Amino acid sequence: MAAPSAKQAEGILEKLAGGIDMKDAPRLINEFMEKRTSIERSLQKDRSMVKNVLHRIQLLIEMFRNKEFKVDIKAKALILAGILYFVLPFDLTFDYIPFLGYVDDSLVIAAVFRMLSGEIERYEQFRRGKFEREGKLDQRPVADNKNTTTAITGATA
């Protein structure tokens, strides 16, 4: 199966988000963490695309979980829909196909980033301000949909 186009990915996300129950968030996030660990173990070479996707999802989870940062319910549903798509082993391109199995997952996560770009930018500004106040400023580049944007990470990153 071919990877979805950006429009198809957005359609998939909207459909998945409509059926998301916020009670599923801990389970979905846990499944992502398990899949992330499995992928990282299986990577024999530096697969920057996969690592970038994993980092993007981690940022979305951080934004979702942050109690000080308010995210509306639709944005939370899109985040969980993206995670759900990522953890499903049998999506448009089966994940068991080495490397190629994550191409569609990457496109779906990129669609989440496009759809929530304003929220993500607002979150990065929130984090920047918080870490500057706490004296924990550490800027690391994170690839976005265009080139590179600066993500601010704390001491725990």
Image (tube, rainbow, N blue to C red):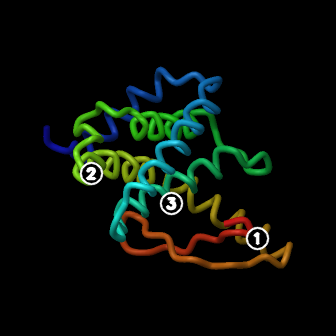
The N terminus - image quarter: top left
> Residue 7: x, y in percent?
26, 42
Q: Mark 1 or mark 3: which comes first in sequence?
A: 3
Amino acid type indicated by mark 1:
Gly
How packed is label 3: few (under 14 Cα within 10 Å), some, or many (20 or more)? some
Residue at which label 2 appears: 103
> Residue 18: x, y in percent?
46, 23
Q: Identify the secondary structure beneath mark 3.
A: helix
> Residue 92: x, y in percent?
23, 35
| Residues tagged 2 and 1 counted as in contact (Cβ below 8 A) | no
Tell me the CA gap for discs 2 and 1.
Answer: 34 Å
Q: Give the foreground label among 1 and 3.
A: 3
Q: Identify the secondary structure beneath mark 2.
A: helix
The C terminus - image quarter: bottom right
Tell me the CA gap for discs 3 and 2.
Answer: 15 Å
Q: Residue at x 57, y 56 (%)?
A: 59
Q: Nearer the viewer, residue 99 or 128?
A: 99
Side (left or right) of 17 relative to 140: left
To which quarter of the image does residue 145 belong?
bottom left
Is residue 91 positioned above or below 70 on the image?
above
Residue at which label 3 appears: 55
Q: Residue at x 71, y 71 (%)?
A: 128
| Residues tagged 1 and 3 counted as in contact (Cβ below 8 A) | no
How packed is label 2: few (under 14 Cα within 10 Å), some, or many (20 or more)? some
